[in-house]
Image: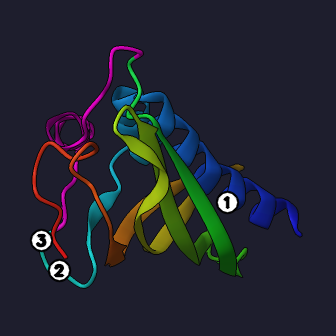
Amino acid sequence: MTDTATALGNLIARYAELIDEGDFDGVADLLGEAAVGQGDSPSLLTGRDALADLFKSTTRRYPDGTPRTKHVTTNLIFEIDEEAGTAAARSYWTVLQAVDGLPLQPILAGRYHDRFERDGPAWHFSERRYLIDLVGDVSRHMLANVPS
């Protein structure tokens, strides 16, 4: 992989790590001013505080501060324009969860369509679209309904 592909892959992996730690402020910092939304929806959420509020209002956290999940991201495909300082990535994601009364199992699966921009040497998210393909038992994960 190129240095850029590694940097972009690390951003995608850092998102999974932060969300699984229950660090929704960290997720919002990572996404920064990126536009975030579902599929091809014309309404995208922007702004660090709005993004932090979204995760805090929809994702259940347990006494250890985490949602007791593991986000697994695979099948990364990068399209990088080094000269323009832009990139896109597509990937699959699966959310696993295990809590009292729910043995370890996949509860959600879908795809990310990400866009990135480079400021100097550093890459950052400019857009994250998530597509939900499969929904399992999210009753112990979500505080609000997950759109299907």
Q: Which residue occupies 77% across, 63% down? A: 4
Q: Position of residue 135 (x, y in %)?
A: 30, 71
Q: Are marks 1 and 3 in contact (CB under 8 Å)?
A: no
**CA–CA distance in space, label 1 to label 2:** 24 Å
Residue 119 at least partly seen? no
Q: Which residue occupies the foreground of this view, 61 or 11?
A: 61
Q: Of the residues under marks 1 and 3, which one precedes in the sequence?
A: 1
Q: Of the residues under marks 1 and 2, which one precedes in the sequence?
A: 1
47 vs 56: above or below: below
The type of residue carrying mark 3 is Ser
117 vs 62: above or below: below
Image quarter (top left, top right, bottom left or bottom right) of the N terminus: bottom right
24 vs 41: above or below: above
Magenta span contains residue 54 = yes
Q: Which mark is residue 76?
A: none
Q: Position of residue 52 (x, y in %)?
A: 25, 35
Q: Which mark is residue 8?
A: 1
Task: Give the colour scheme shown.
Answer: rainbow
Residue count near mark 1 (Cα–Cα under 10 Å), binned few <14, some 14–19, many ≥20:
many
Residue 137 at least partly seen? yes
Q: Are marks 3 and 2 in contact (CB under 8 Å)?
A: yes
Pointer 2 residue: 41
Pointer 3 residue: 43
The magenta stretch spans which residues? 44-64
**CA–CA distance in space, label 1 to label 3:** 25 Å
Q: Which residue occupies 49% across, 37% down? A: 20
Which quadrant of the figure has residue 141? top left
In the visual, does 8 lie left or right of 94? right
Residue count near mark 3 (Cα–Cα under 10 Å), binned few <14, some 14–19, many ≥20:
few
The type of residue carrying mark 2 is Ser
**CA–CA distance in space, label 3 to label 2:** 5 Å
Image quarter (top left, top right, bottom left or bottom right) of the C terminus: bottom left
